Amino acid sequence: MIEIKNVTKRFDKTISLNNITIDFNIGESIALMGANGAGKTTLIRAILGYYHLDSGSIFVNSLNPIKDRVEVLKHISFVPQLPPPIKLNIGELLDYVSISSDISIDLIREYANELKLDIDSNLKKSFFKLSGGMKQKLLIAISLAKQSDIIIYDEPTANLDPKAREDFYRLLEKSSNNKIMLFVTHRLEEVSSLVNREVYMDLGNVISDKKI
């Protein structure tokens, strides 16, 4: 589970997270919503161990995301809203994630095929030069192949066409058991069939948290 207790995070004089306390548990599929600047991305990055907190604590499966970051990240699949500027070609990237995270390349290929992404004909292409949709499909395929306890998606369908979105949500429905799935999204209607909890944030606060 993810335990967030009395967490405050400031950037200069701006409070991005304001004494937040909230838990996310196995079996929950959560839509995390709110306007830009609400604190959603800061919360996600804090869970991933990107930030030192001003106060409070976060534990992921009883581990500290900063002190135990390598072990924590073994349990998390994360797809950011903007794909990172990876300079490796697809073949090199697949080899890297296979070795570093013990992910099956064959399983990545299976998920990519489900998303209508032909990996084999693009192995020599630089990830950096792929279209936004191709980047997103590959990152999603890797995240699903990792088979993590915790899956976090930050606006995962932003670069996907309608058919690819359908494929993505169909794959998630197959793999949602016994996991924490956390969607940062502005499209509640798209994830409504997948989520069982809705959390709204505003100005660094959790203003609504309801199970559905």
Image (spheres, helix red, strand yellow):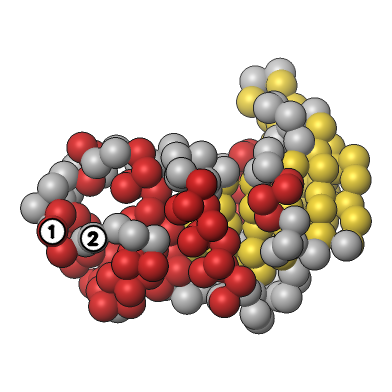
Name of the residue lying farthest toward the left: 124
Q: Are marks 2 and 1 in contact (CB under 8 Å)?
A: yes
| 49 vs 185: above or below | below
- Per the model, the C-alpha gap separating discs 2 and 1 is 6 Å
Position of 170 compared to 187: left or right?
Answer: left
Q: Residue at x 45, y 69 (%)?
A: 144
- The image's mark for residue 196 is none
Quadrant for the C terminus in the image = bottom right
| Vertical comparison of 209 with 203: above or below | below
| Residue hosting label 2 | 118
Q: Is residue 3 visible?
A: no
Residue beneath label 1, please? 121
Residue type pointed to by label 1 = Ser
Circle 1 Cα neighbour tier, 10 Å, few/some/many (<14 / 14–19 / ≥20): few
User: Tag 2, which secondary structure?
Assistant: loop
From the top left corner, tell me how far across and down residue 1 is, in percent.
70, 71
Bin the neighbour count of mark 2 within 10 Å (Cα to Cα): few under 14, some 14-19, many 20 and up.
Answer: some
Corner quadrant of residue 57? bottom right
